[in-house]
Image (cartoon, rainbow, N blue to C red):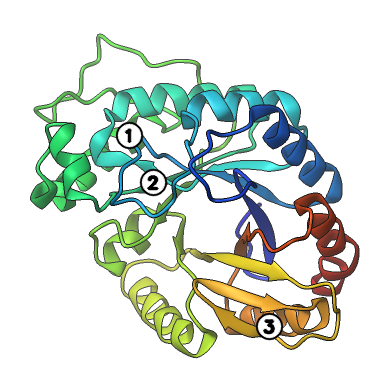
Amino acid sequence: MLFHPDRLSFGIVLPVQARTSADIRFDTQLDMASHADRLGFDALWVRDVPLNSASYPDPVGHADPWVFLGALAASTSRIALATGAIVLPLRHPLHIAKAALSMASLSRGRFVLGLGSGDRPTEYEIFGADVESRKTLFQFHWERLAAALRQNPEVIDEGGRVRNEFAIRPSLQQRSIPMVAVGSSSQSLEWIARHASAWMTYYRPLSIQKDRLALWRNAQAKVTTDFRGFGQSMVLELLDNPEAAYEEVNLGGRSGRRGLIGALAAMREAGIHHVAFNLAAQGRLPGEVMEEIAADILPAMR
């Protein structure tokens, strides 16, 4: 289970490569993925970036997430495969359902479906969607997607009608596919707590993130008694010097391993359940960084 009330799990954000305008290097990323799998990381996170533009700060030429996930499923055996996040308003929910069911089957139950609303008006424009309608569009697409992913699936048409003459396959072979809200998705926290199994957000200094956690707990208390996970992405610059103190950087931290262990322990104590590392390029080989995390940090956190 990727989100558990009593433990902190760890993921790697792919691609692990320098943030330049170069396209994704598939062979390298598949090697990284299988290495993370062997080292004991809990998840690999894949982004959905349909189009590159100056308005998107990451210049990497990302792969189609579903094609990439299929290759990851074939290259790994244990690690969860997660989307962070499929842009739900810009993709048809029945296409997403088909892909998600296929991934769940191909990965033998390791797939986690992270969904976001996207926030680039120009991207909405080029896909012929109204960015101002993303809140209601996200909700309607979520409803149709969730219906198609149930144990007894239903295909809902554009008018909200159940169309019993259609079936969507492959059939669900596991209890459920976790649906995770990534970012605010233009929704209230109560809506997210009611509909999503977990909420993934971006890194904030812990003193600030604790306020978000308090709001999240309050939202959950109003709508459900079920457990709802809380996770965050995190830029990580792991330094050679194990004694280097933890310090904040943009959307993450820079630290030696001892300082990082202390920071992660504080996150776990605050109620964070998952951290997805975005490994920053800072002179060290990413495989070496993952090995240090696996050898010295993961055991200290479990």
**Of label 1 and label 2, which has the lower sequence position?**
2
Report x, y in % for residue 172: 52, 25
Q: Is residue 100 above or below residue 253?
A: above
Which secondary structure, mark 3? helix
Name the residue that disc number 3 marks. 263
Residues under labels 1 and 3: Cα distance?
A: 37 Å
Which secondary structure, mark 1? helix
User: In terms of depth relative to the viewer, which is nearer, 243 or 192?
Assistant: 243
The amino acid sitting under disc 1 is Leu
The residue depicted at 81 percent of the width and 50 percent of the height is 287
Name the residue that disc number 2 marks. 115
The residue depicted at 47 percent of the width and 48 percent of the height is 84
The amino acid sitting under disc 3 is Ala
Which secondary structure, mark 2? strand
User: In terms of depth relative to the viewer, which is nearer, 30 or 298?
Assistant: 30
**Of label 1 and label 3, which has the lower sequence position?**
1
Mark yes or no: residue 59 visible.
yes
User: In terms of depth relative to the viewer, which is nearer, 115 or 170?
Assistant: 115
